[in-house]
Structure formats: structure tokens, C-alpha cells
Amino acid sequence: MTSKIIRRKRTLRVKRKLRIRSKIFGHATAPRLSIFRSNRYFYAQAIDDVKAVTLASVDGKKMGLKCNKEDVKKIAKALADALKAKNINEVIFDRNGYLYHGVVASFADSLRENGITL
């Protein structure tokens, strides 16, 4: 792809991100679950926006897992275990401008299967 197309795609994602982020807000009992996916790795963190602290996080790169549907399910299980250890059963899902399909949808579905309400 040309740099012009890449720049346009990045701009559209940032616009979606800001539009979504203006409507959601996490707190201690239901933190905001923010995700980031690159072409290689997947990251997620639960954030309490009131105190501006990260309550739990997982890093696919440190776990040695790639950004595909099967590995993202393992990442979601690890995050669900970390959230349950802190007695958090409900989160507000922040897809961070990414479209809800593929890896992002697989991650969300796996969280639901592991007992976390989105």
C-alpha cells in the first residue's frame, strides 16, 4: 500500500477511537478494558479512569503468543484470571478504534466464556 492509503487508514482509526472513547468511562467496579493489536502481538489492560491506574494487564509479546484467533483466546483467559483475582467480573470494552471482527471479536467472546461480563 502506498503511504497515502496507510495515512488515511490510520486517520480513520484515530477518529473512530476518539468517538468511542468520548462515550465510555471505567471505574473501580467496572474498569475500561482497552486493547491494542499490532500485526504481530495483542495487548489488553483494565483501567480505572477515576484514579487513572491500570488494574490488570496482559502482554501477548511477553507470553510468546501471536495476534491470531487461537492465541488471543489464551490471552483472554490470562486476563480473565487476573481480573477474577481482583474480584472484577464486569468490564467496559474499549475496542480502541478497531473493527469488531476477527481477532477483536474472538478476544471478547473468549472473555465472556471465561466469566467476564462485557
Image: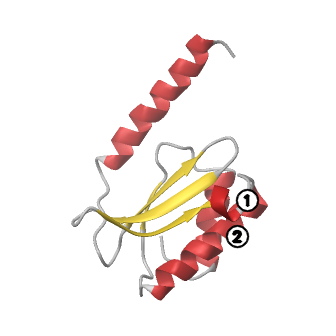
Tell me whether the residue at label 1 lies in contact with that at label 2, contact meaning CB atoms closer than 8 angstroms. Answer: yes
| Residue 27 percent coordinates (x, y) | 28, 70
Which residue does the image show at 59% across and 64% down from the upper left? Answer: 108
> In the rendered image, which quarter is residue 76 located in?
bottom right
Query: Could you tell me the amino acid type at mark 2?
Result: Lys
List x then y, in percent, for residue 47.
36, 64
Mark 1 or mark 2, which has the lower sequence index? Answer: 1
Establish if 77 lies above or below 4: below
> Outermost residue, front direction?
62
Pointer 2 residue: 74
Residue 5, above or below 90: above
Element marked by disc 2: helix
Q: What amino acid is labelled 1 in the image?
A: Leu
On screen, residue 107 above or below 29: above
Q: Is residue 70 left or right of residue 100?
A: right
Element type where label 1 sits in the image? loop
Q: Residue at x 74, y 62 (%)?
A: 71
How far from the left and from the top, in percent, is residue 95?
A: 49, 52
Q: Among all residues in the image, which is located at the extreme left?
A: 50
Q: Is residue 11 above or below residue 81?
A: above
- 102 to the left or right of 93: right
Residue 82 pos. (x, y %): 52, 79
* Residue identified by numbered label 1: 65
Name the residue: 22% across, 66% down: 51
Residue 52's label in the rendered image is none
The residue closer to the viewer here, 8 or 60, is 60
